[in-house]
Image (cartoon, rainbow, N blue to C red):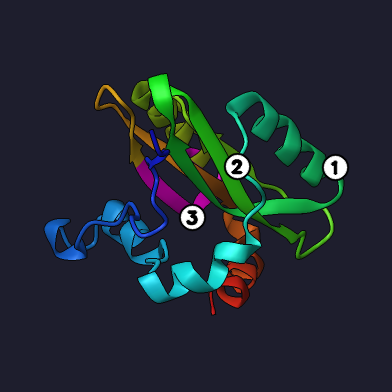
Amino acid sequence: MAPRLFAPILETTPSPAATVPAGSSEKKLRQTIPVITPEIAARIESKFCPWMQPREFGQFWRGEANSHLFPLLIEGRLLYENKREYRAIFEKYPVPDFQFFVEYGNQPDVYEEKKTRLLSNGFEILSQQTVEDAIGRILFLTVFVPKSQMAVARECLDRTMH
């Protein structure tokens, strides 16, 4: 059985901004998360690290962080028997003391709790994709960056995507 992507790079969290009330923080969030077109997906494919199982991926991105690299974008896929794999595109820290937080594969309630805490502590979402696992739960693959460092993080993301 061939692997089935459960976080295709072509799908991103933002739904049409028109469905969100004007002026709401949710509308602002959806307008800032980049949409990845098929053309961009084809161009950035070679920039991803290899696919890894969750534990290996966690160790890998921590090692990259120790080398002053951070994930710009995280992607996932579902294999047989609900086995998951992840990969990401990494970039050098744009400034000394760069900070980020990565969230992937947790239950929706755990994710929402962490997201609320991070947003209330001055973090914003740099990139995010939603995934549906084998039993229909929506999971998030998200990179958070402090608001004070978002401009330089977005420059990294823009360079990678264009």
Horizontally, residue 44 falls left or right of residue 7, namely: right
Residues at discs 2 and 3 in contact (Cβ within 8 Å) = no
Between 23 and 72, the residue placed more toward the observer is 72
Residue under label 1, please give it.
66
Is mark 2 in CB contact (under 8 Å) with mark 1?
Answer: no
Q: Which residue is mark 2?
A: 51
Is-magenta flag for residue 124?
A: yes
Q: Amino acid at mark 3?
A: Ser
Question: Relative to residue 96, is residue 3 depicted above or below?
Answer: above
Q: Earlier in the sequence, mark 3 or mark 1?
A: 1
Which comes sooner in the sequence, label 2 or label 3? 2
Q: Secondary structure at mark 2?
A: loop
Residue 96, image quadrant: bottom right
Q: Which mark is residue 127?
A: 3
Q: Secondary structure at mark 3?
A: strand
- Give the magenta range: 119-130
Mark 2: which amino acid?
Answer: Trp
Locate residue 11, reporting x and y percent. Answer: 33, 55
Lateral position of residue 1 relative to residue 103, left or right: left
Let me know if residue 10 is in the magenta part: no
Q: Quadrant of residue 29?
A: bottom left
